[in-house]
Image: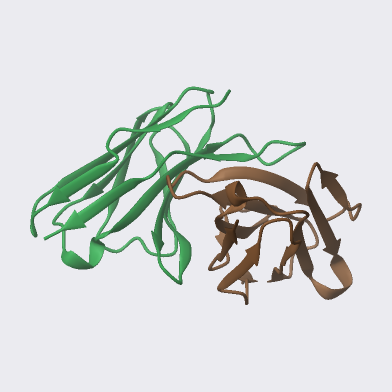
Chain colours: A brown, B green
Amino acid sequence: AQKVTQAQTEISVVEKEDVTLDCVYETRDTTYYLFWYKQPPSGELVFLIRRNSFDEQNEISGRYSWNFQKSTSSFNFTITASQVVDSAVYFCALSESDSWGKLQFGAGTQVVVTP
Amino acid sequence: DVKVTQSSRYLVKRTGEKVFLECVQDMDHENMFWYRQDPGLGLRLIYFSYDVKMKEKGDIPEGYSVSREKKERFSLILESASTNQTSMYLCASSLPLLGKNTIYFGEGSWLTVV
């Protein structure tokens, strides 16, 4: 069975603060894929990153960075110097290797950035 | 750019009506998915398809059916809409998850059943 936990329901920050979103997953597969998506108020899910289980290298993309820790089954996401445009719901998701790309989503974390 | 298009953004239907939600992708993807999104529950998989005329149940298929007659189109059908099917519905498509392929979503369809 798969399970993805995003324990933070909502995080509120003031612009320019850093914010870290936690994601903990459970799977018995040795090969799996982790994703982060952003959902702005318009509703569309915007792909942010995909990480393969066999690649533990952390990644930085502009103000976004991801910390993949296989030992603790976590895939955390940090927004540095947050901006109002970062206000959205962020979802962490897991897909196992033989699941045809089916995604198991966490409940999502609402990020509110105020000026 | 990959484009996943959902035919209706907002729908209001009456209880008992038959409802069709259409999804079209333009990147020749084999896999297509229908998810439902509810507050506090994230997205849950209703059905998916890995080829034309092929379909598999997801986690919450009850009350829904699907159709995939052409590779680019995946339809979600509510045979007899009920108020507990009021929700946001998201379609997605992908190639097999090899290499760096990812999963792309449409803009979503907000369905209200009254």
Quadrant the C terminus of chain A occupies: bottom right
Q: Nearer the viewer, residue B89 or A78?
A: A78
Left or right: residue A60 compared with residue B100: right
Q: Quadrant of the N terminus of chain A?
A: bottom right
Q: Residue A49 at x, y = what percent? A: 72, 46
Q: Residue drawn at (62%, 77%), measured in percent from left and top?
A: A7
Residue that protrudes farthest toward the right in the picture: A57
Whole-percent x, y for residue B14 in the image: 8, 55
Q: Nearer the viewer, residue B90 or B94?
A: B90
Q: Residue at x 81, y 52 (%)?
A: A65
Residue at 60% over, 51% down? A84
Image coordinates of residue B71 in percent, x first then y, are 43, 27
Whether residue A49 sits left or right of residue A67 in the image: it is left
From the viewer's perspective, tell me whether residue A10 is left or right of residue B60. Answer: right
Confirm whether residue A89 shows in the render: yes
Is A81 in front, or is A29?
A81
From what the image shows, is residue A6 above or below residue A112? below
Residue A26 visible, this orientation: no
Q: Position of residue A94 (x, y in %)?
A: 65, 59
